[in-house]
Image (cartoon, helix red, strand yellow):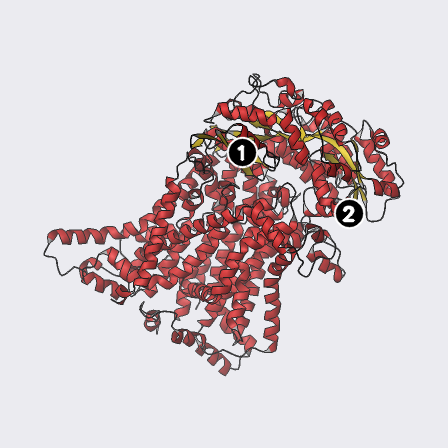
Amino acid sequence: MTTSELTRPRAPERAPESKASRRRVMGAGKQMHAGPLTYVVLTVFAVGSLAPLVWTAIAASRTSQRLAEAPPPLWFGGNLFKNLETAWEQAGLGTAMLNTTLVAGTITVGTVLFSTLAGFAFAKLRFRFSSVLLLLTIGTMMIPPQLAVVPLYLWMSDLNWSNQLQTVILPTLVSAFGTFFMRQYLVQALPSELIEAARVDGASSVRIVWHVVFPAARPAMAVLGLLTFVMAWNDFLWPILALNQQNPTVQVALNALGTGYIPDQSVIMAGALLGTLPLLIAFLLFGKQIVGGIMQGAIKG
Amino acid sequence: MRARTRTARNTVVLAAVAALGAGLLAGCSEDPDDGTSNEGGGSTDGKITLTVGTFGVFGYKQAGLYDEYMKQNPDIVIKENVTTKTSVYWPKTLTRLQAGSGTDDIQAIEIGNVTEAVQTQGDKFVDLGKEVDKSQWLDWKNQQATTKDGKLIGLGTDIGPMAICYRKDLFEKAGLETDRTKLAEQWKGDWSKYVALGEEYMKKAPSGTKYVDSASSVYNAALGGATERYYDKDGNPIWDNSKGVKDAWDAAMSVATSDMSAKLKQFETPWDQGYAKGTFATVACPAWMIGYIQEKSGDAGKGKWDVAAAPTAANWGGAFIGVPTASKHQKEAVALAKWLTAPEQQAKVFAKQASFPSTPSAYPSLKPSPDTTAYFSDAPLTQIFSDSAKTIPVQHFGTKDQPIGTAIADIGIVQVEQKGKSPEEGWDAASKEIKDVLGQ
Amino acid sequence: MTSSKEALAHSAASAETAPGDEPGAVRGAQVRGTPPAATHSWRSRLYRWDMKASPYVFISPFFLIFGAFSLVPLLYTGWYSLHNVQLSDLDNQTWVGLDNYQNLLSSDFFWNSLWVTFTIGVIATVPQLLVAIGIAHLLNYRLRGSTVWRVIMLTPYATSVAAATLVFVLLFSWDGGMINWLLDFVGIDPVNWRESNWGSKFAVSTIVIWRWTGYNALIYLAAMQAIPADLYESASIDGANRWQQFVHVTIPQLRPTILFTAVVSTIGATQLFGEPLLFGGADGSKGGSEHQYQTLGLYMYDQGFMIGNLGKASAIAWSMFLILLIVAAINLLLTRRLRKTP
């Protein structure tokens, strides 16, 4: 059983999202139909999940004065677009979104690429100190980001990099979690025979990575990319120290919105809404893939 | 292999790699001297770019001063770098000053940080004393930015002369005096008289209203008029037996332990809501708070607010602008700083957002917007604030003024006011905090 | 042993197994993979070089960047923690040995922040994971629109710490906040969420719980779906009802996943920073007038960047690291034990 189970993580050519295989797992036995109570309870949680976001939109559609009055508003007012516009301008969200897309995009590409390479090496190649190095990699996951902040902060000043985007890109360009995650995936999903076959054909390591590893790793790369992008988009501690309002990421811009000369709550809420919107839209459009990705990542990772 | 035919995927990966490379290159190769970077001193088209680093809202841009200056000096381009929070702005500025790079050509300094700048960064700033006529500024303002060896590291921008803003309508309902001159007489000279009037107010207070917004506003106002703060003139901490601190603390405690406080934390949502709903009748208001009150009280407060002189002349807040020696265009930066802080320009900023000038010669010509005057029941704002400004005592600040103030207001006073601790417990908590700050 | 459990055990744990021990690893590639076209000696040399060097080339970007931007700073932080480093006087770093650490050990604020980090960690993690299991269980039924439910549960995950906290600050506002308004309906007096000791911890935890429950639910759901059907079949043959099946089949099968999520959440909780900072409003770095929600991360920020004592801040950062190492060691022991029990 063990061996058959281990080979089950299919060969790379067979796309893992193949309906047949997923249905087989999902349909495994106890798929009992949900009773009405299940729907009721789920609805309660769904409301809890969405209510704060919906209320953000409600608050963003009101005025600061209205938000100050006793029963909080429960339905939309007419100020949404005005507040969105103010927030957009005040916080420089245009620049912020562009910056964040660039930052998160670069970090995502870097993390996925480097994690796949390192993950592959750890999963399938033999080299000296590999287990020590892997242990080290895993160990580094526990290093709190706060630990590097003080020296980085001082170096960035010395390098005259303050307020420039590479300051927030470089430190997060690789990820120990990502490396471990890809390693765990590739150990199972990449049949060693494929590599051996390629070796026998005289393929170089670069060719193998390109033609064997990347195709096999694609699903995991997608999941990792997604997780990394969300994380990078929402990163907070380091960007607020490293960047300023002239060249902010979305989170830096949001942090500034809350503390203007005369902070306006409805505008702050509009900013929070705008800053979240791109990811929300992505979730609406690709919800299925995202959910599938996270779940797959959970099993394989 | 099948994979070989999957050109689409390859393209994606290739594009990704290219994007990464491009991103890195773009990031790393960015010329620190071009106009977009934060570096002090690039030039575009033969023009000199000067950057001005500020926190919060200085009002230069809002009052159109940059545009005006650029028109007068066609070879200068001005860029403002705003960091909203002082608490983020100052650590950054400190590190850059010491690194000797990355600073702006002009750097703003908050009053709570100016002593730290004077004592630890004195050699990182250009001595402006020789560049300007110092007598233009209030003497105490200059002194705060002067190093031991007589260097002036920053030019005064605004100051925060204190008054009391009060709700005439609520005072009337509570059966108190509503005339601003007579009111000022009633509490003149002592903040405890102002607190005592609160007892009167509460006897007949209109329902749902309190006398004052918070105990810490009373503390800040009272301390702002004291000759002794947390440090003596040699820079030694004396916070634990300073008379000014003790008096201000006692005044704040009599507020915190009574029912006259609305127990709100300043500059936070409930405080704003307090303005909107009119839940407190008075607030100690430095000049820069005028605009805030007008905005937050909204139409409902129009004509109901009035302004009276504070018990003692006091100052709360204000700032300086200095030119770091790291600036590559010191001469031009000094000229700009001089111009920005000249009386005429300070008057323009006052007209825009009521930041009060630190140059007395501007006072006669100050004109608040008619809108604001009407909002505050036609109170002679300029008169009240300039009277206060001229008699503010010289105060000595120290390197850790800001964290000490935070410890007393946000730890000590809040514990008593919002959590029902005794004044002794509150003071002990604040002391413990201060000792931690000072490493005592 | 089932494969799913095996797989999850990997994710839950550590690298006890070297890659070479992995079933199916390319063992002795040098031996078996000798290219047939070994006639050109330069080519075979190149090939051999490729074989030897490529693993290091593949892992080097990670180690180089990680080394430069995490490891070296980590060591520097350690170095700073043994010095008196003031933000206003960076060039004068005087050696003070372990003074900063001694200072921490004798500081009530440090122990308080440790306690706060622990309590908020527990309040945020335990209910979060329990609810997540519950939701996962419900989602595991055959549902109408199952994807829609899953996406809805995951939406909070898309919200940033900054955005979420700004909203929750308003919801938890003492005066006129939605939550106190709702409490008023059921006759409960308004709670001063920010200043109350447990109230503030609860409020900060709520933000964490809200953002992460759905995400964890999906991870549990994935693990549940990988549980082999025959386990449930035999359980139901033995007469176990749904609840008993849940307790006796689902939960034990989820154990490695639960451990994994617990570890990840613990790491997250130890580093908690943005939520309490923004929850505190204008002077968030104190974490309330009694430091009632000043976590370790916030304490470090306060000491380093507000008070300006970078040496002490570095000592706090290193203490956090040491604490996590201890947590990791405990986790490793637990994992070992879990693996031994069938």
| Mark 1: amino acid | Gly
Q: Is residue B41 left or right of residue B242?
A: left
Residue located at (61% from left, 55% from top) = A81
Rendered image quadrant of residue C105:
top right
Residue located at (37% from left, 57% from top) = C15
> In the rendered image, which residue does mark 1 sit on?
B53
**Above or below — where is C106 with respect to B133?**
below
**Spot occupied by residue B402 in the image (x, y as percentages of width and height):** 62, 33
> In the rendered image, which residue does mark 2 sit on?
B300
Circles 2 and 1, Cβ within 8 Å, touching? The answer is no
The quadrant of the rendering that contains the N terminus of chain A is bottom left
Q: Is residue A164 left or right of residue B87?
A: left
Q: Secondary structure at mark 1?
A: strand
| Mark 2: amino acid | Ala
B335 vs B57, nearest the viewer: B335
Q: Label 1 is found on which chain of the structure?
A: B
B303 vs C71, nearest the viewer: B303
B364 vs B140, nearest the viewer: B364
